[in-house]
Amino acid sequence: MSIVEGFGEELRRHRLARRLTQAELAEKAALSERAISDLERGLKRPQRATVRLLINAFSMTSDQAEEFEQAARPPHALATETVVQVGSPKHNLSSDLTTFVGRSGDIERLLKLLQADSQPVRLVTLVGAGGMGKTRLAIEAGRALLDSYYDGLRLVEFAALRDPALVAQAVAAALPVGEHSGRSLQDTLVAAVRNLHLLLILDNCEHLIQTCAELANLLLRACPNLRILATSREPLRIGGEHICRVGPLSLPRRSGETQIGNESDSEAVQLFVDRAQAATPEFELTARNAAAVSNICLRLDGIPLALELAAARVHQPAGCPTDQCLARKSLQAVGGRQPNCARAPPDVARNSGLEPPPSVRAGASPLRATVDREGSLDHQSVSR
């Protein structure tokens, strides 16, 4: 008997013991009657949130609730050593400070690959140049997948890590799980994760690629209910890896084409406008500046990081044509090519921040030089 069928029988037993119809239980649990029927027939895997709703509807004692939750756990979940206990947070994600813009197609693809009841893809790696938004995409996909994993998800961030020997420690800290004397940390991780139904996000693996690949391979082979979503500038290159390429945001079809009301056609325009309004609430996409916004997005190739840096500089100096100065100020934030515009006197330019950065005055490739200093965008992806 599968775990889904076993839970279905347990659910039906509790329902009949309380002399409830499926419709009555559905109403008490704030679920649909179809959901109750599918669960009892073993057609759906019980999600953690659903299990908690049913426990409340049945007014179970703590012992009954523990037994009921145990019946809902995935295969191999008879754990003797677990990380996420009942009542513990399902994730370690921090609250977002900005809205997530675009990438709906990418999110949909990741959900299909990583849904608990979908095809058996155990490892998905988001691969792309720096600044493309791989981390944010992985986190947003993780949030959408939370209810698909009984034990939730854990995010492990490697960006600030330089020593490969600390990779396993970073994973242990995120779970969290402590070290045990007489046992390697890798063995401790396997023992802790083996019985969990968990999504693990490994972020920024590229500079620790070999160690991350080795640990991911070890955990996936030993932990049947674990799935991993990794982000990196290159694949992990281990068995079963499914690679999803992350590129720029969609662009306006050609320069100057953006029209008011049609900005949703371009994810790059959406992101620029959203971040510009965060920096300058009075900013609006208008007929007067639509062409400039479109040109900025095209010149920055739809790269999310570059667009966010540019959007922070939308203040428009008095006496300067709106579209030209918008482009000039925004592109200077990333050292980009600027349109012809009346030059401010040198002292005014320095005081107002309009003066080009030293790398641009020296004749360096503007966008590449500035983005390199930010340490994020891939050199080749932004070279002209």
Image (cartoon, rainbow, N blue to C red):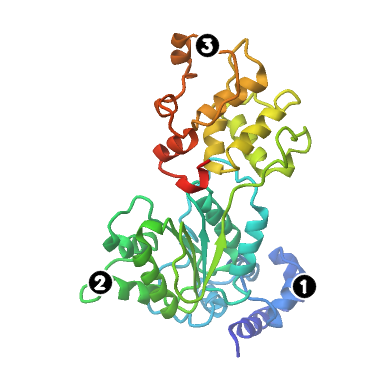
Disc with the residue nearer the chain's start (2 vs 1)? 1
Image quadrant where one finds the N terminus: bottom right
Residue highlighted by disc 1: 34
Element at label 1: helix
**Dot in front, 2 or 1:** 2
Disc 3 target residue: 344
Determine contact: label 2, label 1, CB under 8 Å. no
Dot 2: few (<14), some (14–19), or many (≥20) neighbours within 10 Å? few
Element marked by disc 3: loop
Nearer the observer: mark 1 or 3; the answer is 3
Q: Compute the Cα span from label 3 to label 2.
A: 65 Å
How many residues crowd mark 3 within 10 Å: few (<14), some (14–19), many (20+)?
A: few
**Residue 361 at x, y percent in the picture:** 43, 24
Checking the image for residue 378, the label placed there is none
Image check: 176 left or right of 289?
left
Tell me which label, 3 or 2, sits earlier in the chain: 2
Q: Does residue 173 lie above or below 33 as drawn? A: above
* Residue type, mark 3 in image: Ala
> Label 2 is placed on what type of residue?
His
Identify the residue position indicated by label 2 in the image: 180
Q: Earlier in the sequence, mark 1 or mark 3?
A: 1
Q: Secondary structure at mark 2?
A: loop
Residue under the point 62% across and 30% down: 277
Position of residue 27 measured from the top left corner of the image (x, y, whole percent): 75, 65
Q: Can you tell which of label 3 and label 2 is closer to the viewer?
A: 3
Look at the picture and state if 237 lies above or below 16: above
Contact check, label 1 and label 3, Cβ < 8 Å: no
* Above or below for 384 versus 228: above
In the rendered structure, which amino acid carries the disc numbered 1?
Answer: Arg
87 sits to left or right of 11:
left
Q: Position of residue 111 (x, y in %)?
A: 63, 64
* Distance from the alpha carbon under mark 1 to that under mark 3: 68 Å
